[in-house]
């Protein structure tokens, strides 16, 4: 163990749990963010040494404040919690579906990041990793790319929310650079998770994506900030 600490939101399953496991294996104390205490505790027990449960619903302002009050210092924040309730194109997506998606994928990231900034500022090497999506890249959405067929407007709520997250990644990186922060976004690729039916039917290994997040979480001081990277470390165009 070392004295570094990390928080991974939505870490009771999927990519988030794998990220938490990898960080714990590196010797960090890892707060497993989970809105469901039971599932979170099971994840903590599965991860083992270094894992700590932190009950955290990224859409609950009071709960976020209570969670932040429990963490004195934080070295790594991984904003992993995300939802994809609709795979429909924009004209077939209800406004409420956009609101629900943005509440978690955008507003939740802002709320958590801002609440934990005081703890992050106490770290000599603060790192923030935002789990985005290659489908949020406007360049990839309109041109050939290594992750998905371009030219479809399906999944509009999810993809636009992650595009907004990418913009916030840049803005946080710019405004926190003088304080030594490294803030980057990750495109994990299509992984076998319960994010949506498309992901559930995929064969991509979530653990492979988690290694990309680990790389950004443990960046050296001369590493990049304000970047968007694929799970394998290659840059993704905005």
Image (cartoon, rainbow, N blue to C red):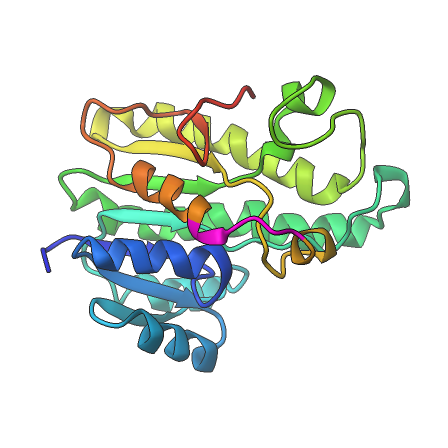
Q: Is residue 142 left or right of residue 224?
A: right
Q: Residue lying farthest bottom? A: 38
Where the N terminus falls, by quadrant? bottom left
Q: Position of residue 152 (x, y in %)?
A: 81, 31
| Residue at the image point whose x is 44% and y is 79% from the top | 37
Q: Residue 22 at x, y = what percent?
A: 30, 54
Name the residue furthest right: 92
Q: How many marks?
A: 0
| Horizontal arrangement in the rendering, residue 146 relative to residue 207 (left or right) | right
Quadrant into which the C terminus falls: top right
Can you say whether 88 is above or below 6 in the image? above
User: Residue 166's x, y, as percent?
Assistant: 53, 31
Image height check: is 117 above or below 81? above
Q: Residue at x 84, y 38 (%)?
A: 90
Residue 65 part of the magenta segment: no
Q: Is residue 123 above or below residue 151?
A: below
Q: Residue at x 76, y 42 (%)?
A: 155
Residue 133 appears at what percent x and percent y? 57, 38
Q: Quadrant of the rendered structure where residue 21 is? A: bottom left
Depth check, front residue: 40 or 69 = 40
Of 148 and 6, the residue lying toward us: 148
Q: Residue lying furthest left in this view?
A: 2
Quarter of image, res 180: top left
Nearest the viewer among 204 and 11 is 204
**Position above or below: 135 against 197:** above
Q: Residue at x 33, y 48 (%)?
A: 77
Magenta part of the chain: 202-207
Q: Main secondary structure of the magenta part?
A: loop
Find residue 209 and report its image quarter. top left
Q: Nearer the viewer, residue 56 or 3?
A: 3
């Amino acid at each position: 163990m070392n004295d570094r600490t990390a928080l991974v939101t939505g870490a009771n399953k999927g990519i988030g749990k794998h990220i938490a496991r990898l960080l714990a294996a590196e010797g960090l104390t890892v707060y497993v963010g989970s809105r469901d205490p039971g599932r979170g505790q099971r994840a903590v027990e599965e991860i083992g040494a270094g894992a700590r449960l932190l009950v955290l619903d990224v859409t609950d302002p009071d709960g976020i404040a209570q969670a932040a009050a429990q963490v004195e210092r934080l070295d790594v924040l991984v904003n992993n919690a995300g939802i994809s309730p609709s795979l429909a194109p924009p004209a077939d997506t209800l406004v409420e579906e956009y609101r629900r998606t943005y509440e978690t994928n955008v507003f939740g990231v802002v709320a958590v990041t801002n609440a934990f900034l005081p703890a992050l500022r106490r770290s000599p090497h603060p790192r923030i990793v935002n789990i985005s999506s290659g489908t949020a890249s406007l360049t990839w959405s309109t041109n050939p790319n290594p992750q998905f067929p371009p030219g479809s407007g399906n999944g509009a709520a999810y993809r636009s929310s992650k595009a907004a997250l990418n913009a916030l990644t840049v803005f946080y990186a710019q405004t926190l650079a003088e304080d030594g922060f490294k803030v980057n976004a990750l495109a994990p690729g299509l992984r076998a998770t319960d994010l949506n039916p498309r992901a559930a039917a995929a064969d991509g290994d979530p653990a492979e994506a988690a290694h990309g997040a680990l790389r950004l979480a443990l960046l050296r001081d001369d590493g990049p900030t304000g970047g968007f990277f694929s799970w394998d470390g290659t840059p993704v165009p905005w």
